[in-house]
Image (cartoon, rainbow, N blue to C red):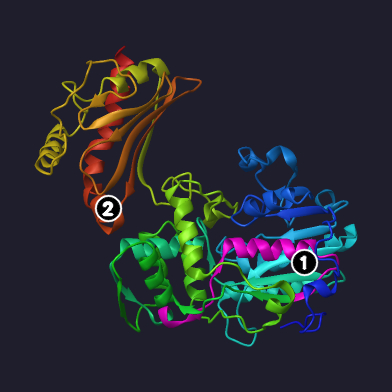
Amino acid sequence: MREHQLHRGESLTATDPSPVAPIRPRSILVTGATGYVGGRLVPRLLEDGHRVRCLVRTPAKLSNAAWRDRVEIVPGSVGDDLREALADIDVAIYLVHGIGDGPDWAKREVRDAANFRDAAVAAGVERIVYLGGMGRDDAELSVHLASRHEVGRTLADGPVPVTELRAAVVIGSGSASFEMLRYLVEVLPVMVTPKWVATRSQPIAISDVLDYLVKVIEVPQPLPGVFEVGGPDVVSYAELMALYADVAGLRRRRLIPVPVLTPRLSSHWVGLVTPVPASLARPLVDSLVNEVVVDDPSTLTMLGPPRRSLRDAITLALGVIDRGEVPTSFTDADFQPFRAYTTDPAWAGGTELADVRVVETTATPEACFRAASAIGGDHGWYRGEWLWRLRGFLDLLFGGPGLRRGRRHPTELRVGDHVDFWRVESLEVPTLLRLHAEMILPGEAWLEWRFEPTDTGTRVTQRARFKPRGLWGRLYWYGVAPFHGLVFPGMVQGIVRDASKS
């Protein structure tokens, strides 16, 4: 570990004899502003009066940010020419991470860090602040943690002072580690677990991570060196899962440790059960083998203790999720494993499975919309009528509406209308029709059609979406998936066929 340039007994206020002195506004570049941490850090910096510039690969992803008009945006990435991004910058915040983004992601991370370091030197940047991952340098680290450390060393291998904060598991709504934990515990009452569930870690609340970042950004003089930041509780992953279950009001989960469950197999299981794709789960699971506990107490001396206990952090995160107020998610970042897929909802709290069919037709969008609007009731569903009737009968047996409700009108729809065991949720003539399922299901389901005009007619996109609830939800989706192949292709083709006749 690199030595701190401050002595261990020296506090942060030793360099600032007036703790209540006003904060000097700085010009700050934030990389990774579209990501999980960056999207939460920017508003904190703006509140303190700093001038913020964001380097982002996809500027459009910030279009809905409440603070969009208060920052300067420079398109690009840390591997590009950074002269414009770093011009007149006092503090550069390095929050990008290429974990799992292609086979050479670790090598690319180091190259990008070197490019960023050299550009910061040329631009006369005062300091670099970097958020990395915890782990002992003398241990056999996972590829993920080893890369995090190597990026820190690369950034610091120059004249610009670098403050590296190393965090363990970040507990907060929308973080990849928290979403993995949340789904494993909520979906699986019994888990066959590998040996790594006994590995100790020191999780930290996202609010404490942000507090530490702001402190090292705003301290009058740079604090070069490595600072390990962890919460007040040291737990094994098994204890973390048990605590989550307790806070969430779930029955205690039963863990069955086995020695043969490899990280590769674990990552595929995580990818199936949680919103975290296997490409991202693999390096995260690999890292769970390494103990990540604060080894150097100087962070407490210089930066102060964390504010949130582990129980408080979990409680706060679940409250934000329950209210639907998740401000940022691990799926927000630009790197491929973090991108939202058709199987992910817009917010970070759940998995969504989908069956998507796209066809082209010479019919107009208006004709396609009219054909789709006639579906259900006496008209039927174009394909697999006996399967629809069977599903309706089973729904009646379990207390659902079945197909007996039919339709209000044979061809016209309005928002709120029932269509058999569906209800019209959204209607935008002639571009969108979305139905929400009211049948008995282990989750929530939607059926929607979008109609986009083309040079020769219309592109029709039919999407069946399912947000599973627990393990039964996933088993249900994969159990009925073979029938999707019998029903859904004929459904969209039937819509196109009827549209072409009108």
**In screen coordinates, is 362 left or right of 326?**
left
Please report the residue visible at 72 percent of the width from the left and 37 percent of the height from the top.
Answer: 69
**In screen coordinates, is 70 left or right of 99?**
right
Label 1 Cα crowd, 10 Å radius (few <14 / some 14-19 / many 20+):
many
Q: What is the magenta range?
A: 197-225
Q: Residue furthest top?
A: 502
Q: Nearer the viewer, mark 2 or mark 1?
A: 2
Question: Which mark sits nearer the N-terminus, 2 or 1?
Answer: 1
**In screen coordinates, is 391 left or right of 489?**
left
Residue annotated with mark 2: 473
Q: Position of residue 249 (x, y in %)?
A: 33, 62
Q: In terms of secondary structure, where does tag 2 sit?
A: helix
**In which quadrant will I find the C terminus?**
top left
Residue annotated with mark 1: 114
What amino acid is at disc 2?
Answer: Gly
Q: Position of residue 308 (x, y in %)?
A: 56, 67
Q: Position of residue 320 (x, y in %)?
A: 48, 52
Q: For marks 2 and 1, give the CA distance.
A: 46 Å
Label 2 Cα crowd, 10 Å radius (few <14 / some 14-19 / many 20+):
some
Please report the residue visible at 85 percent of the width from the left and 56 percent of the height from the top.
Answer: 24
Which residue occupies the foreground of this view, 339 or 291?
291
What amino acid is at disc 1?
Answer: Ala
| Residue 420 position by quadrant | top left
| Residue 268 position by quadrant | bottom left
